[in-house]
Image (cartoon, rainbow, N blue to C red):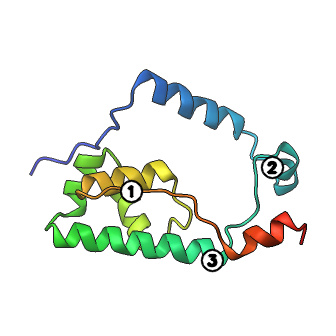
Amino acid sequence: MKAKQPRTAKWSAEDRARHKAIREEFAHCPTQGELEASGGYDGPMKSGAYFKVRFLVHELKKARMDAGLTLAAVSKRSGMDQATLSRLENGRQPNPTVDTLWRYAHAVGQQLVLRLANGESAGQLANGK
């Protein structure tokens, strides 16, 4: 039986450069204090946002299953690693990027729509509360 060859990502030169820059930026493993001081860290994800993301991922998984698609098929369509998709669906990726969600939605025949809406706290923010 022939051993499976590891799947390699099909990254553009721009993708490789972006990933290289990220690896170099975090090569020294910054502390939480350093991240906060850099302005690149907003703190942990708030529980309300977490549950909204989990609900969205649940809906995406349902759309995948309704379409009769396997994770392997979504992986091929989205260009994302199958293990990454599995972690996303199983809640082990609690804060996915918008790009990840968009690619997953597109792969299962859905469209991710982002919109800005007034919330209860908008008035409180305007009043300085």
Residue 112: give x, y in percent of width and height: 39, 56
**Left-right relation of 108 to 102:** left
Q: Which is more N-terminal, label 3 or label 2?
A: 2
Marking on residue 35 = 2
**Can you tell which of label 2 and label 3 is closer to the viewer?**
3
- Residue 48 disc label: 3
Taking 113 as reference, is 61 left or right? left
Check if mark 2's residue and mark 3's residue have beta carbons within 8 Å.
no
Q: Earlier in the sequence, mark 2 or mark 1?
A: 2
Where, by quadrant of the figure, is residue 63 drawn?
bottom left
Amino acid on which disc 2 is placed: Leu
Position of 112 with respect to 73 (left or right) is right
Count neighbours of disc 2 (C-alpha within 10 A) and say few if under 14, some if 14 to 19, many if 20 or more: some
Identity of the residue drawn at 76% across and 62% down: 43
Q: Secondary structure at mark 2?
A: helix
For label 3, the crowd category at 10 Å Cα-Cα, with few meaning under 14, some 14 to 19 and many 20 or more, is few
Find disc 1 in the rendering and name its residue. Answer: 112
